[in-house]
Image (spheres, helix red, strand yellow):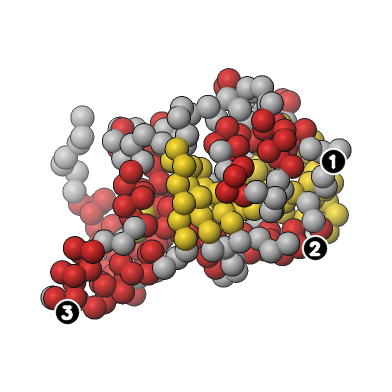
């Protein structure tokens, strides 16, 4: 069955980036000239996805506006003959068909995914967490979809992380069966370092199957008193084959301050117009300007 639906949960409070995330959803923070969410949708589109369900919530209205048609803006750009900008604006809503549902309270990733049940229906689907942004030639999600077509199971994007960071992630236990591919035999959400079965962490790319909804329906809260997607996947271990695919591409976790800045510098440096000057100017700035402090 062809995969052409993506679910993008937007539940997080963006705590690690406060105060900027107090009134601005983390997913709408700029990564150079577009919001973080744009990169997630673009990757999925390049992977063949046409339909997107955003799980939104209070304070996330700007995401709907971003992907919507803006009549006034387009008329103005046409009138001023700013066709280059018009193209950029039109490109956004041509990325796919967008659907929205609100999660009433942040009860966890598993709860957010459960809300996609009617949208997904009986098909396999993609989940993308927008705070993980990759630098790729071939979109990681496309690779995961190919593996799904070959193995017909749940596929998790994974990456090795330092052992002192395992507490931030879902961690898998798995046996390598071919290049980059692991058969998963156990999963733990945010384990303590000494309990982690490996340092293979789930990063924000999943191919899920509709059986996940039967489990999510009755799942009790887990880590941090939230309904955890990792726990639901674990429940399916004896029913559905589960694989982890190690994504080699460099990625930024934009919920982390350092990665957020690096992502901005990287994507800015991809713009030919400013690339040359960018690095010199950053160096100059940091060496010479010692004045203003924000405290
Ligand atoms: C979520 C998942 C976790 C995964 C992580 C990837 O956690 O629950 O299993 O490793 O995303 O970013 P969160 O970052 O929402 O706490």
Q: Which residue is mark 2?
A: 150
x, y (%) of residue 125? 64, 53
Instruction: Choose between 204 and 71: the one closer to the eye.
Output: 71
- State how far apart marks 2 and 3 are (Cα): 49 Å
First of labels 2, 3 by sequence position: 3
Query: Height in image: 257 above or below 22?
Result: below
**Is residue 49 found left or right of 32 in the rendered image?**
right
Classify 10 Å Cα crowding around label 3: few (below 14), some (14-19), many (20 and above): few
Q: Which residue is mark 3?
A: 81
Q: Mark 1: which secondary structure?
A: loop
- Disc nearer the start of the sequence (3/1): 3
The residue nearer to you, when weighing 36 against 196, is 36
**Quarter of the figure with the N terminus:** bottom right
Say which residue label 1 marks.
239
Q: Is residue 61 left or right of residue 150?
A: left
In primary-sequence order, the first of circles 1 and 2 is: 2
């Amino acid at each position: 069955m062809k995969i052409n639906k993506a679910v993008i949960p937007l539940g997080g409070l963006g705590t690690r980036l406060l105060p900027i995330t107090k009134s601005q959803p983390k997913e709408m923070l700029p990564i150079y000239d577009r919001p973080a969410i744009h990169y997630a949708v673009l990757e999925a589109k390049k992977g063949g996805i046409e339909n997107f369900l955003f799980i939104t919530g209070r304070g996330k209205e700007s995401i709907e506006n971003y992907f919507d048609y803006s009549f006034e803006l387009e008329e103005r750009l046409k009138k001023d003959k700013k066709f280059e900008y018009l193209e950029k604006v039109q490109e956004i809503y041509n990325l796919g068909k967008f659907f929205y549902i609100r999660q009433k309270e942040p009860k966890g990733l598993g709860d957010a995914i459960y809300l996609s049940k009617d949208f997904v229906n009986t098909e396999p689907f993609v989940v993308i967490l927008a705070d993980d942004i990759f630098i790729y030639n071939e979109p990681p999600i496309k690779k995961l979809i190919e593996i799904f077509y070959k193995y017909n199971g749940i596929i998790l994007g994974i990456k090795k992380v330092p052992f002192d960071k395992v507490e931030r992630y879902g961690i898998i236990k798995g046996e390598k069966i071919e290049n980059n591919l692991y058969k998963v035999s156990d999963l733990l959400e945010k384990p303590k370092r000494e309990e982690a079965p490996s340092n293979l962490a789930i990063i924000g790319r999943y191919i899920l199957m509709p059986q996940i909804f039967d489990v999510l329906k009755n799942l009790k809260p887990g880590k941090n008193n939230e309904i955890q997607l990792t726990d639901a996947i674990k429940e399916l271990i004896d029913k559905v084959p589960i694989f982890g695919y190690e994504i080699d591409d460099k990625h930024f976790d934009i919920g982390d301050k350092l990665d957020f800045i690096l992502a901005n510098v990287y994507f800015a440096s991809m713009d030919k117009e400013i690339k040359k000057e960018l690095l010199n100017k950053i160096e100059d700035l940091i060496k010479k300007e010692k004045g203003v402090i924000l405290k």
